[in-house]
Image (cartoon, coloured by chain):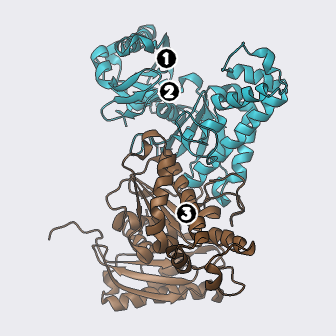
Chain colours: A brown, B cyan
């Protein structure tokens, strides 16, 4: 109806995760018209992973019915810091990658221009352009899952930072000398409020003999608790679960306030697998904690909301990133 | 020698502080050619303060020998959140100001275009364009004095944030539920590492009977310790002073790391009266602490340096802000 289109041509967006590849073909309005999934299979080596990425993109393309000639570009988010100019992924322990020229290698496979960024950065961009952050000039995104990733958008652009680590909100120090984080530091947000951090605290409490319905829900000798298990126990009012999850939400609120006090975004969007499962329960607590820690007027009319795009955020954001020519 | 000039015309920059007004005339290269000072005298009321601001600017102008017709514009930094579009200062407890239309009132007095921003924002801008941050695209400034102010510059522009509180780095929460801050929150950087915070801890230690040479240096019943007094005691190796000041530098390093992990600036500049006095002693500790808390590669080649412009930073930054038409 004459409405301005988001893309000049359909785009392919890819989310390369540690365990699975998700590809989507998006039309000019940013609407997904076909998707495909494959396992990442990082253990098969880098060439095999890149082959599977290309296969997944082409499978989605075939399903979409769009001719490859009509595709504008391919965007991909990878679980690594990325030099967005060269499209090289520096380091992905999960994939066993070091300095992989993703752009060059995928362009050779697909015959299309490819643009590469970090998966959380493109996820943030997806939420900004097509999800919960639509219309905001400046946005912070926090994605809570196994770990905690983040992204910051100022005047519509993702902040990459000097060493391509911009937006690493999971590694802001919230409690100096606090619990050990996977990054080697102590007291990072990720060490306090990620699924891994909560699991660490819950298992330690169980070891001490604290009663919880989780005991019956866990497999023997597990060091993993799924978000769906936490959700079930939380909804059943299990005191141990409720206590630890509420505490994690309080820490998240401090991180939200720190970002708001430092940058003053228009909106903070919280997503990730853990918050997809438990956002309805935990978001109100995050908001109270954030409000408790906002500086003076910094939190006035501040929106702290749940992400909207779920698993599609990174692929859609990658498509947006590609449509802009990788900036 | 054909070098591109910073300003198209000479500018007037003003730093309106809680106690004094400092005005400078800067030539097209951003070099100060004349300055003037007066007391702010906030107790005499807003009109009197604005009269004195105008008088100070004109005194510097007369001393500069530059005709008022040749001046491009006037910039002023005020100790208040500011709506930079309208030039209204929201709230300055020290001056007793609430919603003061500084731009309008000073334009009426001076007959020149006036541009208004927060004093710490223009101080950061001054350091970015003419001081320690020259040439950096993205910079964070932290100014440690009685309190702690901050500013963030991304792609050359000061981040004002949704509620004009962007860059309030002194109010990032560093120790949840820590000491009470003047802002009403607990554990803000300002409540841990400002001169007021250190003074609070030192006086409490003296009350407990801890020996320190400060006891003989302080006036009776004082609740104020000057930066110069701290410097003297620190240099003499006074254990109480050294311990508390080093501790404050450690907290500052956490704040630096949080900003670096979140945004990844090219440089962090630390200034303010307290660091002008004690920067040589404390900066190395700030750097070690920051490095301790950087996320992975975030701190690679990160420069954490002392400010260079001293008391002139805000006036020069205000001149830069004016030269850009208030953006």
Q: Position of residue B106 (x, y in %)?
A: 32, 19
- Foreground: disc 1 or disc 3: 3
Against B247, residue A124 (above or below) is: below
Q: Work out whether disc 2 and disc 1 sit on a shared chain.
A: yes
What residue is at 50 percent from the left and 12 percent from the top?
Answer: B37
Q: Work out whether disc 3 and disc 2 sit on a shared chain.
A: no
Circles 2 and 1: CB atoms closer than 8 Å: yes
Q: Residue A235 shows which numbered tag?
A: none
Near-viewer residue (B31 or B13): B13
What residue is at 62 percent from the left and 70 percent from the top?
Answer: A240
Q: Quadrant of residue B54?
A: top left
Residue under numbered circle 2: B314
Q: Quadrant of the C terminus of chain B?
A: top left
Residue under numbered circle 1: B22
The reply, left or right, for residue A312 in relation to residue B245 is left
- Circle 2 packing at 10 Å, graded few (<14), some (14-19), many (20+), is many
- Foreground: disc 3 or disc 2: 3
Q: Position of residue A83 (x, y in %)?
A: 55, 64
Near-viewer residue (B191 or A64): B191
- Circle 3 packing at 10 Å, graded few (<14), some (14-19), many (20+), is some
Q: Position of residue B253 (x, y in %)?
A: 68, 44
What chain letter is assigned to the residue under label 3?
A
Residue under numbered circle 3: A246
Q: Work out whether disc 1 and disc 3 sit on a shared chain.
A: no
Q: Secondary structure at mark 1?
A: strand
What residue is at 46 percent from the left and 27 percent from the top?
Answer: B79
């Amino acid at each position: 109806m004459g409405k301005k289109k988001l893309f000049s041509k359909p785009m392919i967006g890819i989310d390369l995760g540690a365990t699975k590849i998700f590809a989507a073909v998006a039309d000019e309005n940013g609407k997904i018209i076909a998707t495909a999934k494959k396992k990442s299979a990082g253990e098969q080596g880098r060439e095999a992973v890149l082959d599977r990425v290309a296969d997944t993109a082409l499978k989605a393309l075939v399903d979409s019915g769009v001719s490859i000639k009509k595709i504008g570009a391919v965007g991909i988010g990878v679980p690594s810091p990325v030099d967005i100019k060269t499209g090289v992924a520096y380091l992905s322990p999960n994939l066993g990658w070091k300095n992989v020229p993703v752009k060059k290698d995928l362009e050779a496979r697909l015959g299309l221009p490819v643009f590469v960024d970090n998966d959380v950065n493109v996820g943030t961009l997806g939420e900004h352009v097509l999800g919960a952050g639509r219309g905001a000039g400046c946005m912070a995104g926090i994605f809570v899952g196994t770990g905690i990733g983040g992204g910051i958008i100022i005047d519509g652009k993702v902040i990459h930072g000097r060493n391509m680590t911009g937006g690493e909100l999971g590694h802001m120090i919230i409690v100096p000398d606090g619990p050990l984080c996977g990054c080697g530091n102590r007291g990072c947000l990720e060490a306090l409020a990620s699924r891994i951090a909560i699991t660490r605290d819950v298992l330690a409490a169980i070891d001490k003999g604290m009663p919880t319905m989780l005991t019956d829900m866990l497999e023997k000798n597990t060091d993993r608790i799924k978000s769906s298990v936490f959700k079930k126990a939380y909804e059943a009012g299990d005191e141990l679960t409720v206590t630890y999850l509420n505490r994690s939400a309080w820490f998240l609120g401090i991180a939200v306030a720190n970002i708001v006090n430092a940058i003053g975004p228009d909106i903070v969007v919280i997503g990730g697998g853990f918050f997809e499962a438990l956002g309805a329960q935990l978001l109100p607590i995050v908001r109270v904690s954030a409000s408790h820690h906002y500086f003076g007027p910094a939190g006035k009319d501040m929106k702290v909301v749940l992400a909207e795009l779920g698993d599609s955020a990174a692929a859609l954001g990658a498509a947006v990133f590609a449509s802009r020519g990788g900036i």
